[in-house]
Amino acid sequence: MSHDIPIGATQVSLAALNDRSREIFRQIVESYMATGEPVGSRNLARLLPMTLSPASVRNVMSDLEQLGLIYAPHTSAGRLPTELGLRFFVDALMQIGDLTESDRRSIEAQVAASGAAKSVEAVLTEASTMLSGLTRSAGVVLTTKSNVRLKHIEFVRLDTERALAVMVAEDGQVENRVVNVPAGLPTSALLEAGNFLNAHIRGKTLADVKGEVERALEAGKAELDQLTQKVIAAGLASWSGGESDDRKLIVRGHANLLDDLHALEDLERVRSLFDALETKRGVVDLLGRAELAEGVRIFIGSENKLFSLSGSSTIISPYRDGSGRIVGVIGVIGPTRLNYARVIPMVDYTAKVVSRLLGT
């Protein structure tokens, strides 16, 4: 499972820390993930597996601060990890846990329950809701509308040069798109185009249909007149256009982000994140970048401009359709003190379960 990313990669090498420094740094990070609070030298000295005086702990903390791994918020005597520190912890020190058998069964059961309806949207919504609940974060999915499996297509004339392509998906979704058609086109050509496409589409995604129909037309196998072919070509062209409209963002569990707020700044942070999720555009761009990668991607705080104000972390993984193509991403958005070791394998496994369901 890949979770290393070049964005904001740590400049600190593991060799820069001795065992003592590593242990103190780990305790600071793990305490932050558990409570969100700064931890001081006296508490750290009690937590450590080795015997160290608070003064010795303070010396190590000073070194860690100089490396940019921790900082003191306000006038607090305690320390918190910086974003650089969190990235270093995730990349160099963290042991990614494996999911328990019951975790796996729970994920499979919840996502598969929606898969019985064979609705892509239902599978994705259920998966993001389930991830949100398990991680106490917001579950996010970026998908393409063209993933839906089609059931029926019909062309309805609007005026002399335009027709409406009505597409009905297997899960009951209906989408209408206006297509340009040749002037003076007989109604019979619209009917013939619809019949031809319906013979090819059932149970297939738009992407599959496009490829199959284009091949059939090129091979000249389709016994269709020129006008009917033009209607079909216009339909295919309109379905492949408008990338931005083809992206759909599903967010579940916003309310989880309001739990466990520690201060007014936390509320501002979450408000800023809600604004970002509301505008969607930036979120779509960010999640879209993860589609280019294999495995889990982790963005911590300002490693992505979108969440630099809200100080949130995103853990996402791509999922695939039946032909093995990456068609979207699924994951969670939460505070930077996410339990990365637990959430990473959950996101990874959920993406695999969704891929398996969409491939059947």
Image (spheres, rainbow, N blue to C red):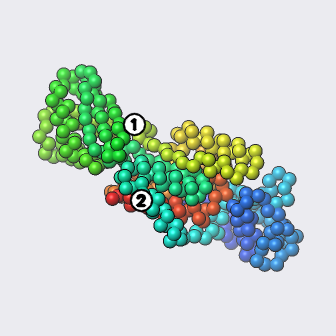
Which image quadrant is residue 283 in?
top right
Residue marked by disc 2: 112
Which image quadrant is residue 68 in?
bottom right
Q: Position of residue 31 (x, y in %)?
A: 73, 64
CA distance separating discs 2 and 1? 31 Å
Q: Disc 2 or 1, which lies upstream in sequence?
A: 2
Q: Position of residue 340 (x, y in %)?
A: 61, 62
Horizontally, residue 224 falls left or right of residue 238, namely left
Q: Using the image as rendered, state which of residue 158 and residue 87 is in the foreground.
A: 158
Q: Amino acid at mark 2?
A: Ala
Q: Would you place residue 198 above or below residue 226 in this image?
A: below
Q: Nearer the viewer, mark 2 or mark 1?
A: 2
Horizontally, residue 60 falls left or right of residue 216, namely right
Q: Would you place residue 90 above or below residue 183 in this image?
A: below
Residue at screen point 76% across, 45% down: 264
Residue at screen point 61% across, 42% down: 274
Q: Position of residue 54 (x, y in %)?
A: 86, 70
